[in-house]
Every structure is written in C-alpha cells, then in structure tokens.
Amino acid sequence: MFGTRRSIFVREQVSLMKLRDTYDLLDPETEAVLGQAKDEPATWAKWSRLLVKKALLPTTLHIYPTGQTQPVLSVHKKAAFLRTRLEVRDASGQMIMGLLSKAFSLGGAFRILDPAGQEVGELKGDWKGWDYKATVQGQPMGVVTKKWAGLLKEAFTNADRYLVQSERPEQLPMLLGLALAVDVVYKERQG
C-alpha cells in the first residue's frame, strides 16, 4: 500500500449518528482506493460515546490495504482529559512512534516520541489548524493539510479530508498515523 509512495489522500466517510469512523485512503492523483482506516474501539468505549465525549475515550484505528483483513498500521489512542497519548504501531505490533498532545497550542500540536519515550520531533499546526508540519530531529518529515470539502460538508458534518505528503517514502506510514491522530484528537466535534 505504501511502497515508494510519498503522498496519500485521507477522506473521512460521512454518516449520521456514527459510533465508529471510517476513512478512505486514496491515491492523490487518480483517486483510486488504496485502503481504509477503521476506528475500532472496545465495545464498552463504543457505546460510551453515547454519553461521554468521544475525545475522552480510548480507541484504536487500524489501517487496511484494499482486499486485506490484517492491518498494516495501527494508531492507539489512550483515554485522555487534558493531554492525549497515542501510539503508532506497525503490522507486527511494534511501536514505531509515540505521540503526546500539547496541552495548549493554537492550531494543535503533538510531541513525537521514539519507542523509548524520548522526544524526537513535533507535529505543529498553523493558527487555523489546517496545515501541520512534522519535523524529526530537526529535519522536515512532511506535511498534513486539511482540505476544504465544500460549504455544506464543512458546515453540517465533521467528515474531514487530508492530503498527507512525506519527504521520503519510508516516512509516509508515520505521517499517515499523525494525520489520523490530528483528526481523532483535534477535529472530532461529535460527543
């Protein structure tokens, strides 16, 4: 699914009264479906979303290439109140990076942690929270850009769209994990 690709388009599916989110992963040039990211919380957490704000509950997003039933990447979000912790794991379950949201930032930001928990970079949004730049060890890793979906979709849904562009192909899975983290932590308005 990733190969030598340096960009991927993430389109959140629109649905009413959803308890789980689904994202289509598309080729930015052809719009061919490459896979899906599915929000798969524990059963108790899914039903708790009817009573508790979704951002406070834990969840797991699994990324599946088209036609496969095993995830190639997972984003695990822990229960949170002020600062959110997330882990991005590969297909074998190995943590490839940790994320810690910054408590106070204008457009949203994460500290990027290595598997040992040491800070190695950051993802920082602009003042309006639409353009995010990731740096690791002082070097640019890529950008996550929220795309305008049109007046009606923006006003009446929380289905977002992101263009994810990495500096190098091997960084695209990590950047996709960052894009999904931005949506789950900062963009979900649903209760």
Image (spheres, rainbow, N blue to C red):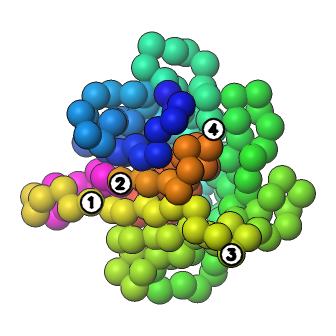
In the image, residue 41 lies at what x, y percent? 58, 38
Q: Which residues are magenta?
A: 153-162
Q: With 54 as the anchor, is 146 left or right in this view? A: left
Q: Is residue 160 magenta?
A: yes
Looking at the picture, which amino acid does disc 4 mark?
A: Ser
Give the quarter of the image for residue 27: top left
Q: Say which residue label 1 marks.
A: 147
Disc 1 or disc 4, which is closer to the eye?
1
- In this rendering, the answer to whether 185 lies above or below 10 is below
Looking at the picture, tell me which residue is in the foreground, 90 or 8.
Answer: 8
> How far apart are the two marked residues, 2 and 1, measured between alpha carbons?
6 Å
Nearer the N terminus, badge 2 or badge 3? 3
Mark 2 secondary-structure assignment? strand
Instruction: Estimate the spatial distance between the alpha carbons at disc 1 and disc 4, rounded to whole Å.
Output: 23 Å
Q: Is residue 152 above or below residue 124?
A: above
Q: Which mark is residue 138?
A: 3
